[in-house]
């Protein structure tokens, strides 16, 4: 049975799951959910995700929501497929886990706020973002990326010398922001810039962002 992902290429949470599937070399079917018309609040999506959000995920009888939990399920279930995304060494896995939590608690809030103002509002709602919010969140991002820059002088990836879910969790929303004024904030830090380039030119990233939704 083919894995089904109910989501949208406008949703970084959906793309996070698709990237994980691509890294694991797993076939899937993306069932597009029209966010602009509120399809994610319709009964057929609410039955799969009670919060009326995307993605929703089906793997035979396993039905999940929340992109990070789905990604961990994929990695733990399809251990022999594709790229290893959680280190088998518990000490190295613990470091990866630290940076997964950093992504959730520190990176995601600021980056989602910026993506909302710079990407979602103009693309979906055809309105201009709030410059005051952008300026405020940019300062937070700059301080955060200073920490990332220091970390990435120590290892090629956030969790160590191997690409992992700690890095993958960041990709989708960074890709969105590369088409905005925030690109310069990433590129002004050499180790962060190299890390971003590595993430965006991974075969799995190129594959997923080349997906055409009909």
Image (cartoon, rainbow, N blue to C red):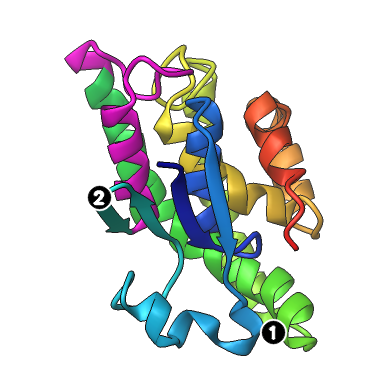
Tag shown at residue 159: none
**Separation of residues labelled 2 and 1 (CA atoms):** 40 Å
* Residue shown at 63% from the left, 62% from the top: 138
Q: Which of the two marks, 2 or 1, is nearer to us in this view? A: 2
Q: Is residue 88 visible?
A: yes
Quadrant into which the N terminus falls: top left
Left or right for 76, reference 165: left
* Residue shown at 78% from the left, 89% from the top: 127
Left or right for 155, reference 37: left
Left or right for 111, reference 43: right
| Residue with the mark numbered 2 | 62
Could you say whether the residue bearing mark 2 is in a helix, strand or loop? strand
Q: Are marks 2 and 1 in contact (CB under 8 Å)?
A: no
Label 2 packing within 10 angstroms: few (<14), some (14-19), many (20+): few
Figure quadrant of residue 156: top right
Spot occupied by residue 143 in the image (x, y as percentages of width and height): 53, 50
Relative height, residue 32 to residue 198 (above, below): below
Let me know if residue 67 is in the magenta part.
yes
Could you say whether the residue bearing mark 1 is in a helix, strand or loop? loop
Relative height, residue 102 to residue 8 (above, below): above
| Residue with the mark numbered 1 | 130
Relative height, residue 167 to residue 1 (above, below): above
Instruction: Please report the bounds of the magenta region as a residue range.
Output: 66-92
């Amino acid at each position: 049975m083919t894995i089904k992902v109910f989501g949208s290429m406008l949703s970084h949470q959906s793309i996070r799951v698709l990237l994980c599937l691509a890294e694991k070399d797993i076939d899937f079917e993306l069932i597009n959910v029209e966010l602009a018309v509120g399809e994610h609040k319709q009964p057929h999506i609410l039955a799969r995700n009670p919060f009326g959000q995307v993605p929703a995920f089906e793997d035979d009888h396993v039905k999940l929501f929340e992109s990070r939990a789905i990604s961990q399920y994929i990695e733990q279930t399809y251990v022999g497929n594709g790229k290893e995304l959680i280190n088998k060494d518990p000490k190295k896995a613990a470091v990866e886990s630290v940076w997964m939590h950093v992504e959730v608690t520190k990176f995601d809030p600021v980056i989602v706020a910026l993506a909302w103002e710079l990407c979602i509002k103009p693309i979906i709602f055809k309105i201009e973002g709030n410059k005051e919010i952008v300026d405020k969140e940019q300062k937070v991002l700059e301080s955060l990326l200073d920490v990332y820059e220091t970390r990435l002088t120590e290892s090629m990836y956030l969790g160590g010398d191997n690409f992992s879910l700690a890095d993958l969790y960041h990709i989708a929303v960074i890709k969105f922001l590369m088409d905005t004024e925030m690109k310069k904030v990433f590129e002004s830090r050499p180790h962060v810039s190299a890390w971003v380039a590595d993430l965006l030119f991974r075969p799995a990233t190129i594959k997923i962002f080349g997906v055409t939704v009909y």
